[in-house]
Image: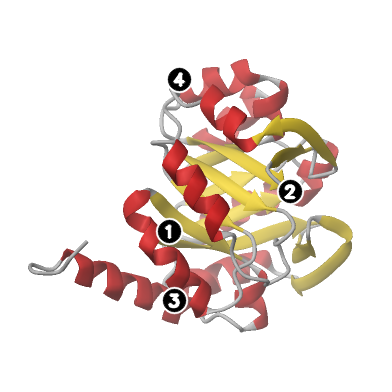
Amino acid sequence: MIIFPAIDLKEGVCVRLMQGDPDRVTVYGNDPVAVAQRWEQEGAQWLHIVDLDGAFSSSPKNRRMIQSILKSVSIPVQVGGGIRHWDTAADYLNSGVKRVILGTAALRDPQLLESLSADFPHRVALGIDARNGRVAIEGWKETTATTVATLVKQFSQMPLAAIIHTDIHRDGMQSGVNLEATRELLESTHIPVIASGGVATLEDIKALLPLAPLGLEGVITGRAIYNGTLDLSEAIGFVGKNLLETRLPGKER
């Protein structure tokens, strides 16, 4: 189970929003490159980057900063926010981004997701941001009538890298992860799932760990590691140790 440190970019700096509200923003660093390097030094295996300006405006706004981050770290990076066209996604994937995330575009233009996943198999993730089981789009400003289950079923046969599921009500709130919704999603699909929203302490990582054998690829954490309620290196070490122990001879899975 991978722990993905989140780097949310707004006007070139590293921030976190509460429940996706751009008016409830906290700046955590004026140098996102330094932030990325810090998480890599603490043992991160991946980085999760979101172009918030891109998500709200429907086109990338922080590409130059993302490129600077890519050049500064050696670990793989996944990027979302404002990716609405094939050329945008392809440009990211051809310039060093390991995985792109499509949310709004997947709902608005399903053929785009189909085309991209065919051209870049297992390098495109479906981002599902949900309020009470309904999919939200356009930087979470619009909640649709589409359910999470419906969207997952629609794309179940595509060679996607992962489904990134965010509980909007919990995002940035450090209120604990939505275990029930995560388990339901895992049981409904063979595609690996990455959980997001609500991580506060190591206890949340411990609570998610039993879901790893069901296909939970990882969890995204942001405010908790910036505020210091979760120690990234400690969490990574805990996951590595406990998953190793489950695989040792004589240990039950």
Q: Residue furthest right?
A: 23
What's the CA distance linking mark 3 and mark 2?
A: 29 Å
Q: Residues within 10 Å of mark 1 (few under 14, many from 20)?
A: few
Answer with mark 2 or mark 4, whichever residue precedes in sequence.
Answer: 2
Q: Amino acid at mark 1?
A: Ser
Spatial distance from mark 4 to mark 1, Cα to Cα?
26 Å
- Find out whether the residues at labels 2 and 4 contact each other: C-beta distance under 8 Å: no
Q: What is the count of numbered marks? A: 4
Q: How far apart are labels 3 and 1 at the CA level?
A: 20 Å
Amino acid at circle 3: Ala
Q: Position of residue 34 (x, y in %)?
A: 61, 71
Q: Residue 37: tell me if it is visible.
A: yes
Q: Is residue 1 visible?
A: no
Relative to 29, 5 lies left or right: left
Q: Which residue is depicted at the point 68% across and 45% down? A: 129
| Residue to which mark 1 is pinned | 74
- Pointer 3 residue: 235
What separation in Å lies between label 4 and label 3 (alpha carbons)? 35 Å
* Residue nearer the viewer, 77 or 5: 5
Q: Earlier in the sequence, mark 3 or mark 2?
A: 2
Label 2 crowd bin: few (<14), some (14–19), many (20+), radius 10 Å: many
Residue 202 position, x and y percent, is 50, 78
**Distance in Å between CA atoms under marks 2 and 4:** 26 Å
What x and y, as percent, mark residue 103? 66, 36
Q: Secondary structure at mark 4?
A: helix
**Disc assigned to residue 118:** 4
Residue at image position (28%, 75%) is 241
